[in-house]
Image (spheres, grey):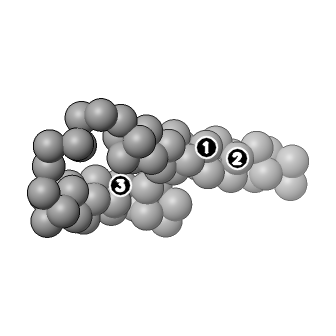
Amino acid sequence: MQGATSNQGMFWSQAREVFEEIVSWLDSDSISGLEHSQIESQLLENGYEPLRRLL
């Protein structure tokens, strides 16, 4: 059972890394010139990756 637990941690950490990249992007100056709709589109595009990794 111990092996399954460590594998789960690896999968969660991969999803968390992608999520943290999205949060960092939202917190950066690079979005300051973007329209709300552009930010939303980018979130929709990139937001599926953490979900995919969680599944």
Q: Residues within 10 Å of mark 2 (few under 14, many from 20)?
A: few
Question: Percent x, y for residue 15?
Answer: 51, 50
Describe residue 13's horizontal placement relative to residue 39 as left or right.
right
Q: Which residue is mark 1?
A: 13
Considering the numbered disc 2 on the image, is that residue within a helix, a strand or a loop? helix
Question: Percent x, y for residue 22?
Answer: 39, 46
How many labels, in total? 3
Q: Residues within 10 Å of mark 3 (few under 14, many from 20)?
A: some
Q: Residues within 10 Å of mark 1 (few under 14, many from 20)?
A: some
Question: Percent x, y for residue 25?
Answer: 35, 40
Residue at left 70%, top 47%? 9
> Mark 1 and 2 residues: CB-CB less than 8 Å, in contact?
yes
Q: Amino acid at mark 2?
A: Gly
Residue at left 33%, top 62%? 48
Question: Percent x, y for residue 14?
Answer: 53, 43
Describe residue 52's horizontal placement relative to residue 38 as left or right.
right
Q: Amino acid at mark 3?
A: Glu
Determine which of the numbered discs, if any, sits on residue 49 in the image: 3
Q: Amino acid at mark 1?
A: Ser
> Which quadrant is home to the N terminus?
bottom right
In this rendering, does residue 18 appear at all?
A: no
Instruction: Mark 3 vs mark 2: give the one in front.
Output: 3
Q: CA distance from mark 1 to mark 3?
A: 13 Å
Residue at left 61%, top 43%? 13
Q: Which residue is mark 2?
A: 9
Considering the numbered disc 1 on the image, is that residue within a helix, a strand or a loop? helix
> Mark 3 and 2 residues: CB-CB less than 8 Å, in contact?
no
In this rendering, does residue 51 appear at all?
A: yes
